[in-house]
Image (cartoon, rainbow, N blue to C red):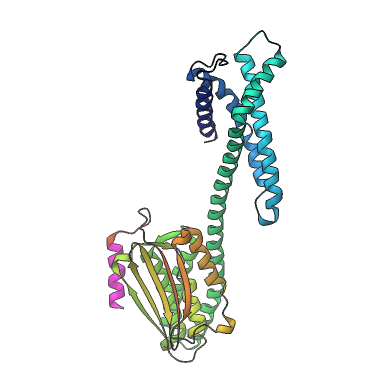
Amino acid sequence: MTMVAYALLAVSQSTNVYAIQQGSPESRGFGTFRFALALMLPTWALMAACVPLIARLARTYTFAPQNRARSTIMHVLAGLVFAVIHITAISANRILLLPSKDPIFDQFAFHFGKSLTYLFYQDVLAYGALLALYLALHYADLRAQLANARLTALRAQLNPHFFFNTLNAVSTLALQGRRDDVAEIVGRLGDLMRTALEERAQEIPLSTEMAFVDDYLAIQRTRFGDRFQVEKRIATEVLDAAVPSLVLQPILENAVEHAVAGDEGVTSVTIDISRRGDDLFVEVSDTGPGFVPALRKEGIGLSNTRARLEELYGNRSRFEYDNLPGRGASVRMSIPFHCDAETAPDARANNGYALRENRA
């Protein structure tokens, strides 16, 4: 990739040199584009050796807010040095390719002056372009690493918290002699934990995410009994849509812990998923006490979800939450509607999920 970039720069600068020298009485041998290209390629090949140094400077002098002024000064100076070195290499190369009877110093001064006049700005811009390219690639890698880190943190948050709550529920059910419920909740817990630990994709089909959600909700219904009711309104045509893995669990956990567990009455949670134009719309609402205005602060689950959506979809995503009129709370999000051909399940798998939902 580096050599391709430098080859393109060499062609660009060769074109520039060829155009400048055409018709000039001081062309001194720049008669063809082929010769201009031969003159530029060796110098840019030499400058390719500077790429590791530029990368090191970019890592050392970052543009973090606390270092921005100092780093800007350092990179401006580095760009100027880069240009001088390149022009020096060009001048030396021209002395070898265009020998004359003039003293070496006079030849060097002639070529250096010409290159400084016409090529200096392009060399500075080249340094800036290479620096920008490195920063863009580095930033993209950091975003991917951060997204993976957030997904790992989400699993780490889910595993111990949910695992111990479920074990307490299993213990209670066992003391009550409800063996069938114990067997079901342990089986569901195994499926859920296996999915949380093994799934590594950032995006999965909605049908796969809903299968994970079903195991989570089944455990919670066993835990809270008739106090917890769930309604799902999911359009069949969106089951192939790609969604971030584990995106619904933190939202549902927030509803369960703050609405169901914190209320002695019956609480209903509704999951509404549909397509609206080019977006996939998801809303999770409950009939609990809602968000407390004085203590309204995003927990780890909601803030993690918001950050993941921003990292994956940028300004194409939307995430908001608020209290409903009268009683209850609503969490809403939308992401670009798309299907991942590599992860989307076949139609039979989706139809099977839809039929199961209709029978529930």
**In the image: residue 205, left or right of residue 134:** left
Q: Position of residue 171 (x, y in %)?
A: 52, 83
Compare residues 103 and 299 and report the one nearer the observer.
103
Q: Toward which corner of the image does residue 266 lie, by quadrant?
A: bottom left
**In the image: residue 341, left or right of residue 92:** left
> Going by the picture, which residue comes out furthest to the bottom?
265
Q: Is residue 184 at least partly visible in the picture?
A: no
Looking at the picture, does residue 174 appear above or below residue 301?
below
Compare residues 308 and 26 and report the one nearer the observer.
26
**In the image: residue 118, left or right of residue 244:** right
Residue 41 magenta-highlighted: no
Name the residue: 49% across, 87% down.
Answer: 289
Looking at the picture, does residue 246 appear above or below residue 271?
above
How many tags in the picture? Answer: 0
Q: Position of residue 48 (x, y in %)?
A: 60, 31
Q: Position of residue 135 (x, y in %)?
A: 58, 46
Name the residue: 62% across, 25% down.
Answer: 115
**In the image: residue 233, left or right of residue 53:** left
Please report the bounds of the magenta region as a residue range: 348-360
Q: Position of residue 277 (x, y in %)?
A: 33, 64
